[in-house]
Amino acid sequence: MINIQTSTQGVEAHRRLLMALAWGAILIITTPTIILRLLVQDLPAEPLTPYWLAGSIVAILVLLWGMTWISPAVKPLRGFFLALVAFSLGFFFGIPFLYGNKVRIKGKDCIVAELESLHAHGWRGEVFFVDDNFIGNTRKLKKEFLPALTEWMERKRYPFVFNTEASIDLADDEELMHLMVQAGFTAVFVGIETPNEASLEECNKVQNKNRDLIGSVKKIQGFGLYVTGGFIIGFDNDPPSIFERLSTFIQESGIVSAMVGLLNAPRGSKLYERLSKEGRILQEVTGDNTDFTINFIPRMDYETLIRGYGRVINSIYTSEPYYQRIKMFLRDFQYRQKKTFQFHFYYLAAFFKTILFLGIIDEERVYYWKIFFWSLFKRTRLFPWALVFAVYGYQYRKVFGRYL
């Protein structure tokens, strides 16, 4: 998946699990030579931050190790490096502390030129528009950017599939959702965070308050945009009931890829400053907010918090409820894309590997075969999606199995 940054303010918080890599389903054609050339373009005019430098080191190590499956960003490179850092650290923090509050948006011609470059290099597949909120300027999106993107995609016969990050109030703008789908967007990462109103207030997620969050998710998916949800546990205002409430919310929403992490406070964030003044900081962040650790003293009893988090993870990724969510999503989702199908032999290899690992070797293969045949005959057009979600679930269970 290629990352394109539409705003120099944005940082990708979206943490997609590229399980298809393990099956050989995705081959990134970008060579180290191309990446090295990108590394020396668009160096930030502002002073280099520790995050930029850390990202640079990550990118260079990737090249040295020959791990060419890491996707390059197009421009600006600072966004790529920060995206890598955000991916690897995986903690909850405010974007403004990195970039400030000034929003700077690229012009449509610049974005189209970058897509042309990707297309010329032979890339076909997913492109992620890296932005902390893609819909921050709806007027420009509707009048300039999305029409230009749609025209380019139609002319090129839909070579890409676009993903991005948006706030939940995307559900309030039907025209915008329609234009996004027309332009080739298929998925959005939405930071839902929590169903608890007091905790939403605590993290200043005001657009999520006083609304039907489940209804909003279903509306977005009904327009043809698959929702990946981000959730956080560990807020000061989280009640003891938060674990059951969050598990129920995720299940009823039909969000297949629910990314649930523990709140952590990275150095330099407002959260870190507040907790430090309160004498609650214990250590630096580990770099993984799903490793069953936090770096501060929570309001809730620590053991209660960790055990409750484990119950949430177990309840949403256990095979039966997970496959139920796949079925719920496939039943409700309205696929509206015009993408021209392009066959690749590695699709076939990936298909047979899912049968081998999930349909034969896996102990819970019965759920795989149920969704396999149900989607094949009931939602044939979405059959590939069913297999991809099955692979995601297998990976989730393997990753969290180390802790549960």
Image (cartoon, rainbow, N blue to C red):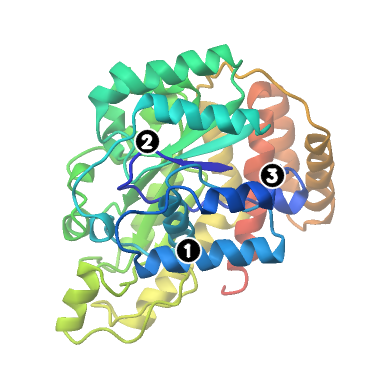
Residue at (42, 53) in percent of width and height: 43
* Tag in front: 3 or 2: 3
Q: Quadrant of the C terminus?
A: bottom right
359 w.r.t. 141: above or below: below
Badge 2: how crowded within 10 Å, few (<14), some, or many (20+)?
many
Amino acid under disc 1: Gly
263 w.r.t. 125: above or below: below
Q: Residue 190 carries which label?
A: none
Amino acid under disc 2: Val
Q: How far across and how far down the image is residue 68, in percent?
A: 69, 53
Q: Give the structural element (helix, strand or loop) at label 2.
A: helix
Q: Relative to 335, is 69 on the left or the right? A: right
**Tag 2 or tag 1, which sits nearer the N-term?**
1
Q: Which mark is residue 217?
A: 2
For label 3, the residue is: 28
Amino acid under disc 3: Ile
Pick whichever, 404 or 370, lies toward us: 404
Badge 1: how crowded within 10 Å, few (<14), some, or many (20+)?
many
The span from disc 3 to disc 2 (Cα, nearest Å) is: 31 Å
Q: Are marks 1 and 3 in contact (CB under 8 Å)?
A: no
For label 1, the residue is: 55
Badge 3: how crowded within 10 Å, few (<14), some, or many (20+)?
some
**Tag 3 or tag 1, which sits nearer the N-term?**
3
400 w.r.t. 228: above or below: below
**Which image quadrant is residue 133 in?**
top left
Residue at (53, 68) in percent of width and height: 57
